[in-house]
Amino acid sequence: MKTVILLLLCNIYSTFLFSQKGTITWDEITRIEINVRRGNPSIKLLKEGLLCEIFCEIEEGKHYPVSTFIPLHRIDTDKLNKLEWFIKSDSIFYKDSIFEDKEFSNSIDEHPWINILIIHPDYSSTYILWDTGEVKKLQKCIELLNELIPENDRKIFAIDPMSYIYSREKFEKAHTQPDSKHQL
């Protein structure tokens, strides 16, 4: 009986904890790192702020790293809270996972993928590899992270996940074009 009451109390407490919509404090920030294969581009939400990096072709054939750092105090608090509560309220961000559409992922030659590392406030971590297929929750997470980037930098540093990830529609479109080389 004590076990049932204890489980019931834990369930009520966790429901209360994840249903809060208050402000996230510094020590409650979930660290999120999004990297497109080989680290180009990447967005990292740290306790100190947001680090965005990309390699740009400045001279023909020469790529240089370009980055920006937005300190935490300059990030829109409402947008940050929205992202944090989105992460905290969904179990997909609490277990290591690989997302792929097995039906065609093995038939695609060289293609990019997205690595997502989440370090929770209790220092537990989750690693997610998004290889192929549509995953709306991961897409939404990246969109919310993009919204933290100031508008004038968003065009350079924001990550459009579906421009890298092969979905069934993109795969079929690539294979129906006559000169298709199976590239993005």
Image (cartoon, grey):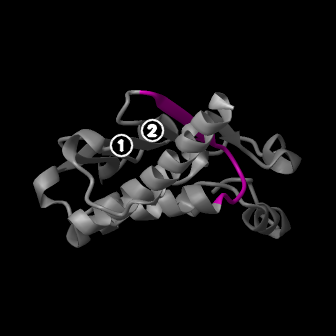
Residue name at image x 62 percent, y 63 percent? 136
Res 127 quadrant in image: top right
SS at badge 2: strand
Residue 100 placement, left or right of 57:
right
Percent from the top left, x then y, of residue 180?
A: 76, 60
**Which residue appears farthest toward the front when viewing the image?**
1
Quadrant (top left/top right/bottom left/bottom right) for the C terminus: bottom right
| Cβ–Cβ under 8 Å for marks 1 and 2 | yes
Task: State which quarter of the image contains the N terminus.
Answer: top right
For badge 1, the amino acid type reads: Thr
List x then y, in percent, for residue 23.
25, 59
Q: Residue at x 52, y 63 (%)?
A: 140
Q: Looking at the image, which residue sits at the far bottom?
A: 151
Which secondary structure, mark 1? loop
Q: Dot 2: few (<14), some (14–19), or many (≥20) neighbours within 10 Å?
A: many
Q: Quadrant of residue 27?
A: top left
Image location (x, y in percent) of residue 117: 47, 36
Q: Which residue is mark 2?
A: 118
- Work out whether residue 44 can be spotted: yes
Nearest the eye: 27 or 125: 27
Which residue is depicted at the point 74% across and 42% down?
Answer: 109
Which residue is label 1 attached to? Answer: 30
Checking the image for residue 155, the label placed there is: none
Hey, what amino acid is under mark 2? Ile
Task: Determine the CA span between mark 1 and mark 2.
Answer: 7 Å
Locate residue 81: give its quadrant.
bottom left
Q: Is residue 41 left or right of residue 7?
A: left
Circle 1 residues within 10 Å: few <14, some 14–19, many ≥20: many
Task: Report if residue 128 lies within the magenta region.
Answer: yes
Residue 123 screen position, x and y as percent: 38, 27
* Identity of the residue drawn at 79% across and 62% down: 168
Q: Which residues are magenta?
A: 124-135
